[in-house]
Amino acid sequence: RKEVEQDPGPFNVPEGATVAFNCTYSNSASQSFFWYRQDCRKEPKLLMSVYSSGNEDGRFTAQLNRASQYISLLIRDSKLSDSATYLCAVNGHNQGGKLIFGQGTELSVKP
Amino acid sequence: GAGVSQSPRYKVAKRGQDVALRCDPISGHVSLFWYQQALGQGPEFLTYFQNEAQLDKSGLPSDRFFAERPEGSVSTLKIQRTQQEDSAVYLCASRGGTLTEAFFGQGTRLTVV
């Protein structure tokens, strides 16, 4: 079983839809959590960090559930430009910033 | 430039050939990471440097893989006797401090034929 797991998708949604991704992690010592966005043939870029209390950045909301060991990303009013692969990543205590990534979830927003 | 720079962007190697991949981190960034990303997968951790010290190499898949950062800035990932399963994108990331964001380079796409 992989340490961080995501549904690879693809998620095909119409413009304006709300879409949610989940990511589960197996290491209960994980301390930091992130969502990255990766466009085709490009490098991953940080979308947002995920805080225990949940956090929002415009149309994007991230949540952390430590008890069930999952993080989520909600995208509201999706745009064509949101089409990309969304990677969740976790970092454990005393791991020096090493990130463990999930497989990524592919999102395709259609007109 | 202001970002993480990797070279070459593309590399085709014959099976059995040695390759060297270069990473120029953001100036002043202490931490440097190497990841391997296979098609359709997320990045997999290979190794981590803090300045010139290699603190974690637990992700290197075999002793054919070797990384160095002798002066604490530029890093080189070397793969000896390349195999077809080494074909992947090799990503480098750097970070300035413990709680700061890691920035990725555009990667080197290695194809072993």
Image (tube, coloured by chain):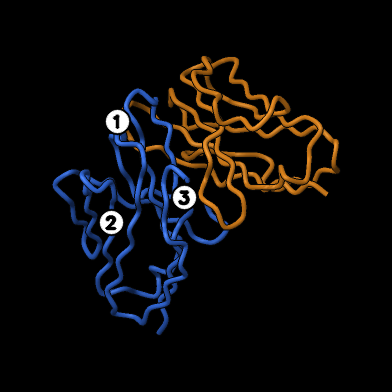
The vertical placement of A21 against A48, above or below, is: below
Q: Give the mark toward the camera: 2 or 1.
A: 2
Q: Give the numbered dot on residue B99.
A: 1
**What amino acid does circle 1 point to?**
Leu
Furthest-left residue in this view: A53
Chain displayed in blue: A
Answer with left or right where residue B12 lies relative to residue A111: right
Furthest-bottom residue in this view: A111
Under tag 2, what secondary structure? strand
Q: Disc 3 sits on a residue from what chain?
A: A
**What amino acid does circle 2 point to?**
Ser
**What amino acid does circle 3 point to?**
Pro
The vertical placement of B101 against A7, above or below, is: above
Question: Residue A9, position in %: x, y?
Answer: 46, 67
Answer with left or right where residue A50 lies relative to residue A97: left
Between the residue at mark 3 and the residue at mark 1, the CA separation in whole angstroms equals: 18 Å
- Residue sitting at 43 percent across and 32 percent down? A98
Answer with left or right where residue A78 lies relative to residue B8: left
- Residue sitting at 28 percent across and 66 percent down? A75
Q: Colour of chain B?
A: orange
Answer with left or right where residue B11 lies relative to residue B37: right
The vertical placement of A55 against B6, above or below, is: below
Question: According to the image, label 2 marks what residue?
Answer: A72
